[in-house]
Image (cartoon, coloured by chain):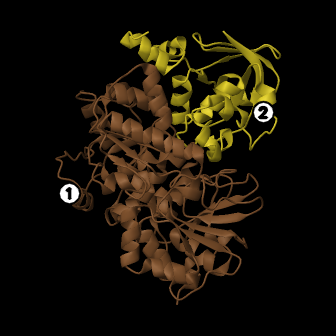
Amino acid sequence: MNIAEKILAKASGKDEVKPGEIVEASVDVAMVHDLTGPLTVKSFREIGAKKVWDNQRIVIIFDHLVPANSIRSAELHKIMREFAEEQKIEKLYDIGRGGICHQVLPEKGYVRPGTLIVGTDSHTCTHGAFGAFATGIGATEMAAVFVTGRLWFRVPSVIRLDVTGKFQRFVTPKDLILNIIGRVKADGAIYKGVEFVGPTIGNMSVDGRMTLCNMAVEMGAKIGIIEPDETTLRFVKSRTKVQFDPVKSDPDAKYEKTISLDVTKMEPQVACPPSVDNVKPISEIGEVEIDQAFLGSCTNGRLEDLRLAASLLKGRKIKKGVRMLVIPASQEIYLQALQEGLTEIFVKAGAFVCNPTCGPCLGGHMGILAPEEVCISSSNRNFIGRMGSPESRVYLASPAAVAASAVTGKITDPRSLEG
Amino acid sequence: MVSGKAVKFGDNVNTDVILPGKYLVLTLNPKELAKHAMEGLDPNFAEKVRGGAILVGGKNFGCGSSREEAPLALKHAGVKCVLAESFARIFYRNAINIGLPALECPGISSKVKEGDKMDIDLKAGIVKDQTRNLIFHATKLPDFIMEILDDGGLIEHLRRKMGSK
């Protein structure tokens, strides 16, 4: 069996599972946030349940609309605080205590190799970076998980992505995943799993691996997953004392297919509006002037991303007429960025540094786009109206390309800024 | 049997156009969500589907976010069933769980035209275009999913199973 099959087999008490089979599995961790949690609570009440199945396995993280930007969002936060208190859920990360859910979950040690994680957010697949089977579900079925601790899954067939080669300077895991999505297309992995293997993945940091798995859903995938190795174990063991059982794919594991890639000659990639699979090498983009540059989100708001952007912005100024937003993914990253002097570099360059939040990525608040405006963003979606007006346009790229473009005022290859 | 007029969309209809993120604060008020369904793609959508309609989409219908508010908005706007070449998995699960039938129906998007009168037998997986006299065979729903739909959604289903009804 491959790693995905092994985790589902274990979670459903079976010796073996096969792609296509439907299993009922026990969930290890269930995560909701401030925008999807309230509907989960409403459904939980309507089911008629009184107590959650296990208040130690539920994590609530406020990130989408923080701090509350309207009376309505303040009410949603209140619903979640009251529910946590009623059910004695201690793992509530309120405003100022956490950050973006997909960053906070591993930071606080809730993501462990070999476990089954569900979250009411499509980017829950991020946690496959640690060898967990992690996937997004809806609010009402999360209510069912809250009641029973169990959920049905169709065992996915898995596409294997074998990656070799060394990245050029300023070419990043984000460029790799955009390139992959451009090949596989937005519907190329519906209902399937995507497993990343190969020496390039082995040499990649935890931050980079999270970026890869995070965007698996943009190909329709149920999970993105990477076998746990020394890098994984070092991170996880530094975050939790809870024991876990790492799982790896068998040597004779079956895959739907293997796609091989060499990143050696890969140039920075850009996903052009209005779909994530509309990917081009940056040299083919032509002249695209920007109004906003956004560095942040569950895809690219981590320390490695901030360091890379800061290395380009140091001693430079953001182009007049362009605004740059920098949003660290968590309080921990926010603090580290301060201590390392990254925040100072951003502020001196003229960037607007905000509190950890999903913010502009989903057009919720903080940096919504006007009609005809153009944004280059390190986030994950560029759909019509995603970040504001349906007439605005979003180009997705790496943190390096976002920073370089903020300096020049148009979409720019970060390699051209060097020196 | 589910019936209504076809309202058509293309491939990769994503949850940000089905229901833009800025309306998610209306999460607990499905009638308000419904007013904004498909706003970015078709400003007249609410009028078109009022009183019952069958949505016909292409590949990867409902891709993007996990927001259950997307199928909720469609259902409360008047959509009776969604037919598509394929679905994004979270949208598919959400639709079933809130009692909105979603059927994979190969070949449908190129043959059915806007406004065609559609009849759907969910149990048999048979889709009829009465206007054009066409019959399509949808992927049949597994029994346990059919049970959830028969009960009116996952909440009702669990209530029945737990005997709290």
Q: Mark 1 packing: few (<14 Cα in 10 Å), some, or many (20+)?
A: some
Tell me which chain the residue with mark 2 is part of: B
Q: Is residue A182 visible?
A: no
Q: Is residue A95 visible?
A: yes
Foreground pick, A224 / A375: A375
Q: Position of residue A336 (x, y in %)?
A: 36, 72
Q: Which residue is mark 2?
A: B45
Foreground pick, A379 / A159: A379
Q: Is residue B23 above or below residue A93?
A: above
Q: Residue at x 28, y 42 (%)?
A: A115
Q: Looking at the picture, which amino acid does disc 2 mark?
A: Phe
Question: Which element is circle 2 on?
Answer: helix
Letter of the chain in yellow: B
Q: Quadrant of the N terminus of chain A?
A: top left
Left or right, residue A26 beside residue B31: left
Q: Position of residue B36 (x, y in %)?
A: 71, 37
Q: Position of residue B123 (x, y in %)?
A: 57, 10
Q: Residue at x 37, y 13 (%)?
A: B162
Q: Residue at x 68, y 77 (%)?
A: A409
Left or right, residue B84 beside residue A297: right
Look at the image and give the colour of chain A.
Answer: brown
Q: Which mark is residue A237?
A: 1
